[in-house]
Image (spheres, rainbow, N blue to C red):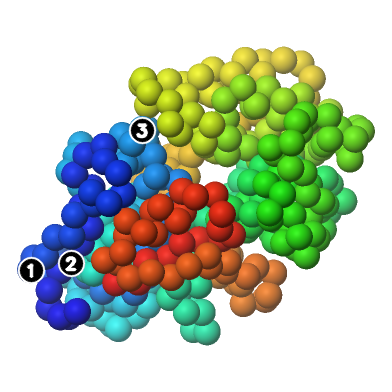
Amino acid sequence: MNAEELVEVVLPGKVEPEELRIRHGAVPAAGPGQVLVRVEATGVSFAEQQMRRGRYYDQPPFPFVPGYDLVGTVQATGEGVEPGLAGTRVAALVKVGGWASHVLVDAADAVPVPDGIGAAEAEALVVNGLTAWQMLHRTARVRAGQTILVHGANGGVGSVLVQLAHAVGAKVIGTASARHHDTLRAWGVVPVDHRAGDVAARVRALAPGGVDAVFDHVGGRGIIDSWRLLAPGGTLVAYGSASTRDDEGSKQWPVLRLLGRTWLWNALPNGRRAHFFNLWAGRALAKERFRARLRADLTQVFAAHRRGDVTARIAARLPLTRAADALRLAESGTVVGKVVLTP
């Protein structure tokens, strides 16, 4: 790949993965306050899977370049940016635009990646690690001795949640299909097959008094079971709507329905709390505070990796030009960890 050529993957509309387009162009110049990042790794998350269906809550109009997060090296700096940043490996959360060879990023949003962690490993921890860290530590405040339930414990976010929970001394029950149970047991997780009947009954058998926190990326009707599985004082953290992935209709409706339920449940006088987690919450109202929190939390995730508390779980590494294959693989439900694209 020519270092001076921009290569990016374009999502032209609500299409099958094979209809993604590869576009070539000139590498952009960094503007005031920006850095130009030569991307070394980006990835496939649930957000891109929803975007190709036109079902992500606040996605831009088609066509656009997807890519929620990235890791790369600063190639150039714009006016007002410390020139010494050039040559630094950084991570950034961008929501869209990451599936490209070069990306312009606000310098304030670029978080240094510590030495000793590769680009693909760091990429596997950006959106997944931030989501897991903030849900576990900021929202649910899980402590030693507690028991939590992680739906999709084999997935990108779920696998990091498992590791962070163990690092604080919590016990983890995790749902996944049977093919992943040996892996979960090796991680110290008590597995429950989400495809084999009454999941709630089997979780209650494992935790008769309820669990202290539930992390639910599925949504739909199952969110009610997640709420009912909470022990007194427990916390439900809903962070997605995977059950509605293939539904037709308004993309806002699953989110609004979840928000409505959490507001209702939080009005009940039983000490339990429900939250709809959004990684971007607060950015519009307090951008600098949001940036400071993101930088602090991602730094904590990278530190946890260096301590050995968290391993970056990479399901596959594919070149950027095989984004369609990467998307298919991520959507297959057969992988453990993050599917990473390497431009």
Q: Mark on residue 26? A: 1
Q: Mark on residue 75? A: none
Sequence order check: which comes first, mark 1 or mark 3? 1
How many residues crowd mark 1 within 10 Å: few (<14), some (14–19), many (20+)? Answer: few
- In the image as oriented, which residue stretches furthest toward the left? 26
Q: Residue at x 53, y 65 (%)?
A: 315
Measure how far apart labels 2 and 3 are at the Cα level.
Answer: 26 Å
Q: Residue 314: image x %, image y %?
A: 53, 67
Query: Helix, strand or loop at disc 3?
Result: loop
Query: Helix, strand or loop at disc 2?
Result: strand
Comparing 245 with 116, the one in front is 245
Q: Which residue is mark 3?
A: 55
Q: Residue 68: image x %, image y %?
A: 37, 53
Q: Quadrant of the N terminus?
A: bottom left
Amino acid type of the residue tagged 1 in the rendering: Ala
Measure how far apart labels 1 and 3 are at the Cα level.
Answer: 31 Å
Q: Residue at x 65, y 68 (%)?
A: 310
**Residue 319, quarter of picture:** bottom left
| 311 relative to 336, above or below | below
Amino acid type of the residue tagged 2 in the rendering: Val
How many residues crowd mark 3 within 10 Å: few (<14), some (14–19), many (20+)? Answer: many
Q: Mark on residue 7? A: 2
Q: Quadrant of the C terminus?
A: bottom left
Query: Helix, strand or loop at disc 1?
Result: strand
**Residue 201, quarter of picture:** top right
Comparing 92 with 32, the one in front is 92
